[in-house]
Amino acid sequence: MLMVVSPAKKLDYDSDLPTDQYTQPRFLEDARELIDQLKELEPHEVSNLMGLSEQLGELNAQRYQEWHTPFTPENARPAVLSFHGDVYQGMQPHKFSEKDFDFAQQHLRILSGLYGVLRPLDLMQPYRLEMGTKLETTRGKDLYAFWREQVTESLNSELAADDGVLLNLASNEYFKAIDKKKLNARVITPQFKDWKNGQYKMISFYAKKARGMMAAYVIRNHLTDPEDVKGFDTDGYTFNEELSKGDDWVFTRDES
């Protein structure tokens, strides 16, 4: 069973690292092609491209200029320990054991607008480039056109060596980077809903955090059978068979 998650806008390059393990991204040359193009943009053009404030435009233009290879532990950081958004606050990878990192390296993939697909321990330098960005490249009108074929082929090669089950914990924006027609997998998509105003609703902040918590549940328990995922019970969530349909699995949480 392979899991995919989205990256995060918020980054952490300051906290202590719980592991000294690291690997290199598989699509570093493709990332370099994008960076070379992004380096030509002025800060205000970066802001316009991604709808950022002037300050964030300047920050990310500077990141593009400073991006360089080779990646080393001195100038880069393992991906799963670099992102610090809601998903990763739910996942809490800084609490993983070495065995957990080993398992995550085999079963967790992070989809990325700049790096395509990252394994948890792949080194990365700081960036912001969301998958939905309409950056025209040599491969098409946007980043979906740039990445879709490679991301799909990469996942297929790994799924073929596994059991052909993909646990989709990514957002719609990032999962669209996968060509579902060419994906050779059974795709299970968990949904997380909270009880509010008399019904179960998906609340974005809680759902993002829950995706990270589910990834951590799979990793810490070293789960390989998708049926075992239904036992997910972190932070009050439980599998709701009545609301689930097929491989769209719904997990609900009542008011505490």
Image (tube, rainbow, N blue to C red):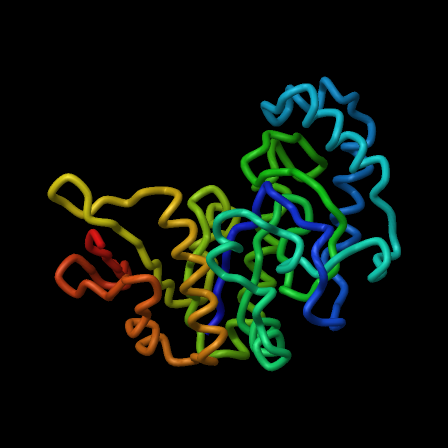
Residue 81 falls in image quadrant = bottom right
Which residue is rendered at x = 47% and y = 46% of the image?
Answer: 176
Q: Where is residue 202 in the image (x, y as percent from the top left)?
A: 28, 45
Q: In which quarter of the image is the C terminus?
A: bottom left
Residue 155 falls in image quadrant = bottom right
Q: How many marks?
A: 0
Q: Where is residue 90 in the image (x, y as percent from the top left)?
A: 46, 57
Q: 97 left or right of 127?
A: left
Residue 192 falls in image quadrant = bottom left
Q: In which quarter of the image is the N terminus?
A: bottom left
Task: In the rendered view, tell whether residue 181 sits above or below residue 107.
Answer: above
Q: Position of residue 59 (x, y in %)?
A: 74, 30
Task: In the rendered view, tell whether residue 211 sits above or below residue 38.
Answer: below
Q: Where is residue 210 in the image (x, y as percent from the top left)?
A: 39, 56
Which residue is rendered at x = 68% and y = 45% of the image?
Answer: 114
Q: Which of 7 and 151 is in front in this view?
A: 7
Which residue is rendered at x = 62% and y = 24% of the image?
Answer: 52
Q: Nearer the viewer, residue 27 or 205?
A: 205
Task: In the rendered view, tell whether residue 162 sits above or below residue 201.
Answer: below
Task: In the rendered view, tell whether residue 64 sits above or below residue 206.
Answer: above
Q: 184 left or right of 31?
A: left
Q: Which of 183 and 200 is in front in this view?
A: 200
Which residue is rendered at x = 84% and y = 53% of the image?
Answer: 75
Task: Single out the residue that lies furthest toward the front.
Answer: 256
